[in-house]
Image: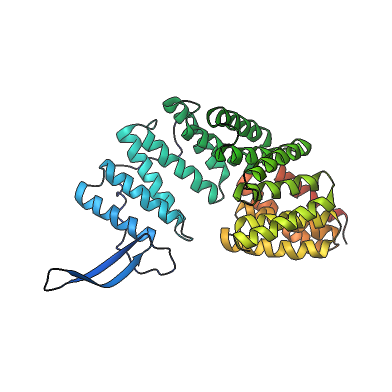
Amino acid sequence: MAPLWRGKRDDEPRQPPPAPPSADPEQPRAADLVVTLLNEDGGEEEIARVGIPPHEFYGMKANAAYERLGPQHPDTLLAFRDYARALARLEGRREEALERLMDLVRLQAEQLGFVHEDTLTTAADIADLLQRMGDPGKAEEVWRSVWTGRAELLGRDHPDTLDSASGLARALEELRREPEAVGLHRDVLERRRRQLGPGHPTVLSDTGRHAAALIRCGRWAEAETELRTLLTQLERQGERDGETGLAAQANLGAALCRLDRLDEAEAVMRTVLAAQRRVKGAAHPEARNTRNNLAAVLHARERYGEAAVILREVVSETSRIKGEGHPDTVQARDNLANVLIDAGERTEAADLLRRCRSDYTRVFGPDHPLTRTAAERLAWLRDNPA
């Protein structure tokens, strides 16, 4: 299947090697540059040590491979992939990372073919980055190409193929194609369970993802049953407050809210939020998601003021971290508009919904359910002024 990236003309310049590193004390070090002094007795004495952040370390390795092996040597291409991956973890460098990965996958496809393990790995990096950058439509297309290619090359049960299917399912969820996502998550879970057994950490994590997909699909009672079974197993293994356990508890709270068991839902959400803040910190994305879900519970309980305070914080943080037009920011803004409508603050709600409708149209298209719903609520506000 043809990938999405464009080919470059022969007269277009190749990607240059990265610039030499510069000091960046905010980044965690990947290696140390050590300066030593050679003593008269032949021993060495360390006199200086400078930490090298990941993007600088991998940039130097890519430069070295470029100079030593040439721009199109397979090892040079892999070194540039490591560099692009490091860039993708930096705010403000993701566009550059995406450009380098797209140039790299084109070269790998020319040299090795698209259905090659190295090419498909780079394409998976592109799909993941597109998703993080808020473009689930393109991410879905690339994930589907990777999944198809890996299934052909490695088989449907290979771990890399299953990882691709999970990535595709996440993109489908963001596109609000929940039934397709549930089917993929279920298929991945069943295949992993057969290979690894029911208690394997990867299987437990996939169980949580499948349950979360059931919630998004409106199958709340099924999700509750699956999550309670998962939490019982995690508790037996002493992992209830681990990453998978906390995510399962948060999803259980969301299912209980949908089932209108609001006392239980609020208690679960507050317990999970306290644990996430303790373990991961208040600014962690999972804690932010739990706050969003807690606001949904408070909204359902008609505690609009409390819900609005939380959602304003979530919108502000998500916008700062992911950008004004990222789907997660738009969804948080949509949630805030819903609360404000019920709180009687309809002018602000209408302003928010106009932005949501514009962003939903840009990301998902004019006929997507989210776009249509935003337009319908705007029409209702117009016909029912405060």
Q: Nearer the viewer, residue 273 or 375?
A: 273
Residue 212 in percent (x, y) is at: 68, 42
Q: Is residue 31 above or below residue 227?
A: below
Query: Could you tell me if residue 368 is visible in this image?
Result: no
Q: Is residue 194 above or below residue 65?
A: above
Total marks placed:
0
- Quadrant for the C terminus in the image: bottom right
Taking depth in this image into account, of 254 and 263 the one nearest to the observer is 263
Q: x and y percent of residue 353 in the render? A: 73, 55
Q: Quadrant of residue 232?
A: top right
Residue at left offset 33%, top offset 38%: 108
Above or below, 120 relative to 346: above
Horizontal and vertical percent position of residue 54:
38, 58
The structure residue drawn at horizontal position 64% and vertical position 41%, both measured from the top left corner, is 208
- Residue 32 relative to residue 243: left or right: left
Residue 167 visible in rendering: yes
